[in-house]
């Protein structure tokens, strides 16, 4: 049996792995931005908010 000194190894940088990871992230982001909304599941249309002429939201549906 031999006794060797324990030395810490320096981390090895893999630039191709970093480039591949960044490329996958950018590709996923671009695909998510251009994904059509009608394929993401059923869409429920809410009733639009009623606003008066000045853009204030009306709190009642009663006409004034």
Image (cartoon, rainbow, N blue to C red):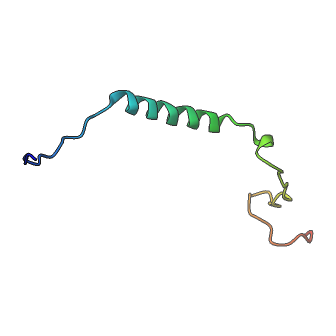
40 vs 62, left or right, is left
Instruction: Give the camera-side residue of 42 and 61.
Output: 42
Total labels: the figure holds 0
Q: Quick one: quadrant of the C terminus?
A: bottom right
Residue 2 placed where, x, y %? Answer: 8, 45
Image: 21 above or below 56: above
**Is residue 50 rendered to the left or right of residue 23?**
right
Residue depicted at x 38% and y 33%: 18
- The answer to whether 20 appears left or right of 7 in the picture is right
Q: Position of residue 16 (x, y in %)?
A: 38, 27
Q: Residue at x 74, y 58 (%)?
A: 55
Q: Position of residue 27 (x, y in %)?
A: 56, 31
Most distant residue in the top direction: 16
| Extreme residue in the right direction | 63
Q: Is residue 4 above or below residue 33?
A: below
Work out whether 18 lies above or below 62.
above
Residue lying farthest front? Answer: 1
Which of 50/53 is in front? 50
Q: Residue at x 70, y 36 (%)?
A: 35
Residue found 63% across the figure and 39% down from its top:
32
Observer-nearest residue: 1 or 42? 1
**Left or right of 16 in this view: 51:** right
Residue 45 position within the rendered picture, expressed as x and y whole percent measured from the top left: 85, 54
């Amino acid at each position: 049996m031999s006794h060797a000194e324990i030395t810490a190894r320096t981390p090895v940088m893999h630039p191709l792995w970093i480039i591949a990871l960044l490329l996958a992230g950018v590709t996923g982001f671009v695909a998510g931005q251009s994904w059509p909304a009608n394929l993401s599941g059923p869409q429920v249309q809410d009733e639009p908010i009623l606003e008066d002429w000045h853009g204030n939201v009306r709190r009642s549906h009663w006409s004034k």
